[in-house]
Image (cartoon, grey):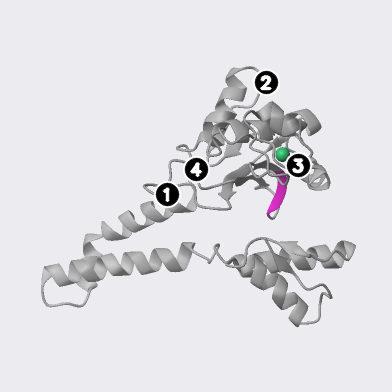
Amino acid sequence: MADYRKVVKEFNCMIGNKTNIIDIQCDSSYNNAINSGVGKTPFQPATQRTHILVDDTTPEKVINITKKNKVCMLGKMHASDDEAKLCQCTANISLQTNIGDEYTFCKEGLLHLKKTDNLEVRNITDPDTASYRASLDLRREGITETVPVNHIDTRHLAQNHRKFIKGQSKLLDLMPGRTKKLREKMQNNFALDLTNISLQTNIGDEYTFCKEGLLHLKKTDNLEVRNITDPDTASYRASLDLKREGITETVPVNH
Ligand SMILES: [Zn+2]
């Protein structure tokens, strides 16, 4: 990732921009959906969180990852974040810490960019995220000098796209259907389909993307995976298939 950050700076230099001003997109992923426990448990179902900052000026480069983990391999219940840090496990937040706190974790990532490579963010994800607020606050606190501007992400873009197509009154006349109601329904469906075709790829394809990552590990450093996440994930299937295809030699076992 440090290398990627250098590439981004070089790229900025080549196109005549300030080298340390970058455009990013960011979001988090959890091992369990953060709201999947509603009504079932008072605890947060997610125990691991990854907040990823992706550079947006060069083709998709991950420039920073902030990892938060509550699972202690030694089976301890960490009551405070300091305690988690002292323990020889990979947990770095306590049971009580709000793992859904995007603001804090994104700020941590942005601060890291600033400290290591003096990078400041100009374009950042959509305005309703805590990540955007974090970047704004860094500017307010005088840590960064660049005023961040927010993107409109694909979800918002899709919404606008759909509304625009729905709002075309001439298009309604072109739609097949005997009654106005039927034609409106057709137009709605048409708007949905068109938006889906133009904006959506299957970003949820964990199998393919995990396989890509595992193949990268194998190719670059001949690394093979033994213990991997739980059996109902596509990631586990990807690691199994790599063994079946003869690319790796280690039989993966699931957590
Ligand atoms: Zn521990």
- According to the picture, the residue beneath numbered tag 3 turns out to be 89
Q: In the displayed structure, would residue 225 be above or below residue 106? A: below
Q: Is residue 119 among the parts visible in the rendering?
A: no
Task: Quickly name the residue at label 1.
Answer: 156
The amino acid type found where label 2 is placed reads Ile
Q: Residue furthest bottom?
A: 245
Residue denoted by label 2: 143
Ligand 1 placement by image quarter:
top right
Queried on whether the Cβ of the residue with tag 3 lies below 8 angstroms from ligand 1, the answer reads yes
Which range of residues does the magenta coloring cover? 60-64
Of callouts 1 and 2, the N-terminal one: 2
Query: Which residue appears at 85% of the width and 67% of the height?
Result: 219
Secondary structure mainly formed by the magenta segment: strand
* Disc 4 from disc 3: Cα separation: 20 Å
Q: Nearer the viewer, residue 213 or 42?
A: 42
Mark toward the start of the polypeptide (4 vs 2)? 4
Picture residue at 27% right of the left edge, 65% below the top: 188
Q: Secondary structure at mark 4?
A: loop
Residue 44: mark = 4
